[in-house]
Amino acid sequence: MTNCIFCKIKDGEIPSAKVWENENFFAFLDINPVNPGHTLLIPKKHVDYLFELDDGVYHELFKAAKEVSVPLKRAVGAKRIGVVVEGFLVPHVHIHLIPINGPGELDAKRAGKADPNELTAIAERIKDAF
Ligand code: AMP
Ligand code: ZN
């Protein structure tokens, strides 16, 4: 889709702190993380709403989430990786994969703008943990 920020990110037209990609999916760090390592996982094909995905893409998306969660958890030393799906700000399907260490940490009100250099450093640590 031409005017979609996440389509532009996966096409490399807008820079991002990429952590992983395969043929159909792309993962990068959220610029307003709730916790360090807050990752967004998207299908490369533009679809607005999670439950409009074809079954095959839907299952592959959650398989990819599981695959990314392991190095992400290891890289930031979190107790768990929490999962959030909203999509009110960016209508391109994305799963928020958020490192958490206790209840309540998924609250979006905790989000704050990250230093771009810090995002690059965290993305490198996650890539190294695959
Ligand atoms: P939502 O659509 O409500 O699930 O939220 C969209 C998320 O995308 C927010 O957490 C934003 O901080 C994040 N976001 C928006 N633009 C960018 C970008 N250029 N790079 C990384 N994350 C972004
Ligand atoms: Zn898109």
Image (tube, rainbow, N blue to C red):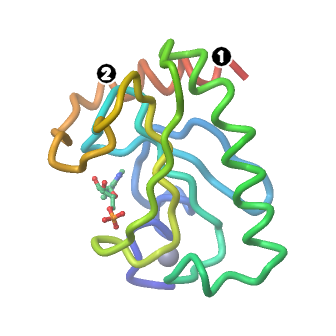
Q: Is ligand 1 less than 8 Å from the beta carbon at label 1?
A: no
The x, y position of residue 106, in whole percent, is 33, 43
Residue highlighted by disc 1: 128
Q: Nearer the viewer, residue 92 or 50?
A: 50
Q: In the picture shown, does residue 95 fall above or below 114? A: below
Left or right: 26 as drawn, with respect to 97: right
Q: Which mark is residue 60?
A: none
Residue highlighted by disc 2: 118
- What is the spatial separation of the Cα atoms under label 1 and label 2, in whole angstroms? 15 Å
Number of numbered markers = 2
The x, y position of residue 72, in whole percent, is 58, 27
Quarter location, residue 53 = bottom right
User: What amino acid type is highlighted by mark number 2?
Assistant: Glu
Q: Secondary structure at mark 1?
A: helix
The x, y position of residue 78, in whole percent, is 48, 18
Residue at the farthest right position:
56
User: What amino acid type is highlighted by mark number 1?
Assistant: Asp
Q: Is ligand 1 less than 8 Å from the beta carbon at label 2?
A: no
Q: Residues within 10 Å of mark 1 (few under 14, many from 20)?
A: few
Q: Nearer the viewer, residue 102 or 91?
A: 102
Left or right: 98 as drawn, with respect to 32: right
Q: Residues within 10 Å of mark 2 (few under 14, many from 20)?
A: few
Residue drawn at the location 30% of the way across and 35% of the way down: 105
Picture quadrant of ligand 1: bottom left
Residue drawn at the location 30% of the way across and 75% of the way down: 88
The x, y position of residue 130, in whole percent, is 73, 23
Q: Nearer the viewer, residue 10 or 97?
A: 97
First reached walking from the N terminus: tag 1 or tag 2 = 2
Quarter location, residue 61 = bottom right
